[in-house]
Image (cartoon, rainbow, N blue to C red):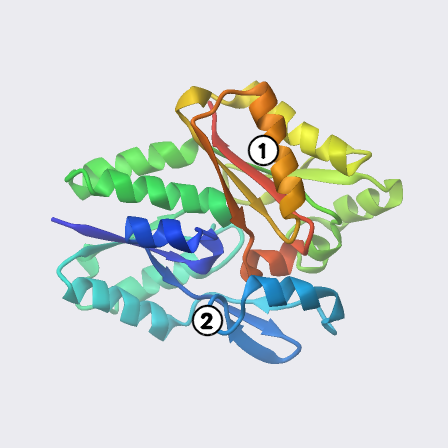
Amino acid sequence: MSFKVLVDSASDIPLDKANEAGIITVPMPVNIDGKTFLEGVDLQTEDFYAKFKTFKELPKTSQPNPNTLLEAYEKILSEGHDVAAIHLSSGLSSTVATARMIREMTSAPERIHVIDSLGASFGYGLLALFSQNILKSGASWEEAENTILEYRKHMRYVFTLDTLEYLVKGGRVSKPAGFIGGLLDVKPVLHITPEGKIEPFAKVRTRRAAIRKLVDVMEQEIVDSEEQVIGISHSACFDEAQILVDEIHQRIKVKDIWISEIGCVVGSHTGPGTLALFYSCLK
């Protein structure tokens, strides 16, 4: 039995790593001022962030087109593979629910395996890359699924934003948290909970302190750091991502650090200036 891992574009896996692993990415739609684009097809991150502050209203996102998902699943089936579909957290999107509905419409529902990532951006991308390696080992789905879900349980997502404004407007974090953040002029640090939802985690006074806070948290929580590939995602703040890399190398020994750019789907809700850190910890 062979498998193909399929993700939606909110996984923010760098194209070279997705291609090398053989992971299929389904584009998600982004609506900007009444016009709908497909992330990675006719909407690229560089142009998106360059124009972000000129948009008349906050971009809106939605789940992948059901027909696009159905076609992608069927194509993988027709090539003789089972589908391991790993999608954006059900705590942030209805994509997982749609994927499970579409599975029942395929020619072989028993060969479509849907996993809720309970995460977003490149943290979820790391989960997909890990899953691809497990599935290539020849394990049965039952064996592989248990290993993937165990890895998911220990995946940690912590991030800082330039402003809470966009998360509050998009309903991804509570208004009181946004109000307090603006009132105190702080730099928020947030995390994704085990249920796949975004919650405030800490507040610091400066951007540099927020970067240090991310590393503080990782230093306290990470396990087997020298065996881990750490993920970093950023939205139009590559220089600060490099500062985060340097801070990690100064304090923690890790196997490697991979940097990804936050795509247009996730970036629609966080805005430019987001810096995220992903690693495995005890829970």
Is residue 83 visible from the viewing direction of this image? yes
| Left or right position of 50 against 120 | right
Q: Residue furthest bottom?
A: 34
Mark 2 surroundings: few (<14), some (14-19) or many (≥20) residues within 10 A: few
Q: Which amino acid is tagged 1? A: Val
The alpha-carbon separation of the residues under discs 1 and 2 comes to: 30 Å
Disc marking residue 245: 1
| Left or right position of 143 against 187 | left
Mark 1 surroundings: few (<14), some (14-19) or many (≥20) residues within 10 A: many
| Left or right position of 259 against 163 | left
> Which label sits in the foreground, 1 or 2?
1
Q: Relative to 241, does residue 34 appear above or below in the rendering?
A: below
Label 2 sits on residue: 41
Is residue 159 visible from the viewing direction of this image? no
In contact (CB < 8 Å): disc 1 and disc 2: no
Q: Quadrant of residue 70?
A: bottom left
**Residue 122 percent location from the top left of the image:** 48, 46
Q: Which amino acid is tagged 2? A: Val
